[in-house]
Amino acid sequence: MRKQDERKQQFKKGMDQEESRRRREATSVQIRKEKKEDSLQKRRAPSRDAGSSSGPRSDVGTLPDMTLKAKLENLPEDVALLQSADPQLQLDATTRFRKLLSIERNPPIAEVIAAGVVPRLVQFLQSYDNTALVFEAAWALTNVSSGTSEHTRVVIDNGAIPIFVQLLRLTNNDVHELQEQAIWALGNIAGDSPRCRDLVLSYGLLPVLVEQLSAPSRTSMLRNSTWTISNLCRGKPPPRWGLVALALPLLQTLTFSADDEVLVDACWALSYLSEPPERVQAVIDAGALPRIVELLGHVSPLVQTPALRVIGNVATGSAAQTQALLECDALARLDTMLRSSKKEVRKEACWIVSNVTAGPLAHVQSVCTAGLVPRLIELSTSGRDDFEVRKEAAYALCNACGCNDAPVLAGLVQLGLVVAFCDLLDCFDATLLVAVLEALESVLGAAAAAAVDGENPCVQTFSESGGLSKLEALQAHDNGDVYSRAVKLLETFFSAEEDDDPLLSPAAHADGFAFGLQPAAAPTQAMHFFP
């Protein structure tokens, strides 16, 4: 018994929960890096027939190369017309520039800027008695700002931002379309960079948008406004909380929109507002969480993806915040996400579950009782999925082992955890190897501590699954942590001097061995792994 007690003291008592969370948060930087394909930061307003004044602009203008060349050769003439005092000539010239900037591929934004027309177009934004001219100028400037940062800077430097914001305060009955165009332009500017975003916010755009959207709006206005709000919330470093917090109630309402485009951008905006972790509670307090969890079941992956990001941000928060997520039945939705046909969705879902299993025992038990463990083990197995998905599934399982709860560990073993870990021991990721070795130490140690006589069945399963030879090979690993942990496991559980120790035999049960010190209680009686 003395030798058994000494062995128990050597066993790892479970991975530190906070350390697990820190590791997972660091991993999230790679998984959840900003990508333009996630949500377009800029949009160019394409050309359309002049007779159409409402609805989405989908008729993208195209000009043959020779026609474009001829148009560019006529730029000096168009510039001269733009400087005319005749309102009709001003409108004609502005319309020509707008069409030139609306062509589908490689619009000549640099050439138009070089012609010196941007200051004049900004000046036309203030021709409030000529809404057609204001609209055409706003459209042209929207497309200038859809270009590079240098192009956007020209629009900013000519003082367009406060004028665009002022257009939103007009109350005329015939200004709705040009206001929508102004919102579009401001969305492009805000989407250029965090610095431009903060500049737009400093002119008080967000309160104006929130006020406008509090009343029923046209679908196109609603779409553009929600997209612009999303750009006002995105970026690193994040915007000052005091400038964007007022959007939360509106965004929560927009998550119930029947329009998918609005849903997508509202969810992206909430995902930005829930970063960094100290902002998660505000999203929860706004009442957005139940609906976001519900949207994980939306038919469109474009809605599911940002909703999944919000859920992931909450899962990286405190234990209480993660509990709020669990109370919304998020694990049932995540089970579906783990079975998604899209690799990125499976990876993100595994990452979220890994944050849940990095929490307290009750959260680990929730994952087990939700029936997620068999799927996680399947996803972690070689040949079953992309390595990035395998890795996230493995972290979810490793973190679960850190709970150091005998019934939970027994259940994991019965579902095939040891075999899955053996399969991971020849992976190339040193950080993951360390996590797997830590988890194995917890599992093998718990089995040894519960053993009464005979051999440790986990050790036997591990050896029969090829784990011992892989563990021995890790003694030559370049990473010091991998090497030291592999050596420790070999010395602790596979040394020859322990082979004949009669104290290591587990209690015999019809359902397998028990990890508890009371041999009469099978682990599945304490924890069920299926709903």
Image (tube, helix red, strand yellow):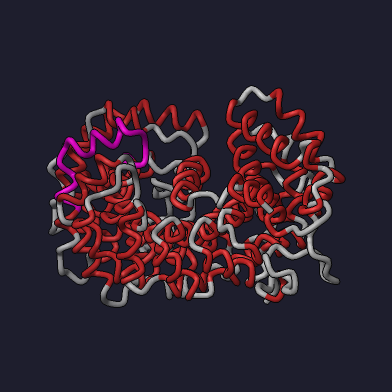
Q: Is residue 260 above or below residue 475?
A: below
Residue 400 magenta-drawn?
no
Left or right of 302: which side holds 129? left
By secondary structure, the bulk of the magenta-drawn segment is best described as helix
Residue 403 locus on image (x, y percent): 56, 58
Residue 263 locus on image (x, y percent): 45, 66
Total count of labels: 0
Residue 186 locus on image (x, y percent): 27, 50
Residue at point 16%, 56% (across, down): 204
Q: Is residue 296 above or below residue 531?
A: above
Residue 151 magenta-drawn?
yes
Residue 407 locus on image (x, y percent): 66, 66
Left or right of 53: which side holds 298? right
Q: Nearer the viewer, residue 44 or 130?
A: 44
Residue at point 49%, 45% (across, down): 28
Residue at point 45%, 41% (across, down): 103
Left or right of 385: which side holds 252? left
Q: Which quarter of the rendering shows the C terminus?
A: bottom right
Q: Nearer the viewer, residue 393 or 433?
A: 433
Q: Nearer the viewer, residue 335 or 355?
A: 355
Q: Which quarter of the rendering shows the N terminus?
A: bottom right
Question: Residue 97, can we see it?
Answer: no
Q: Nearer the viewer, residue 115 or 169?
A: 169
Question: Residue 319, can we see it?
Answer: yes
Q: Which residues are magenta?
A: 144-164
Q: Is residue 54 above or below residue 199?
A: below
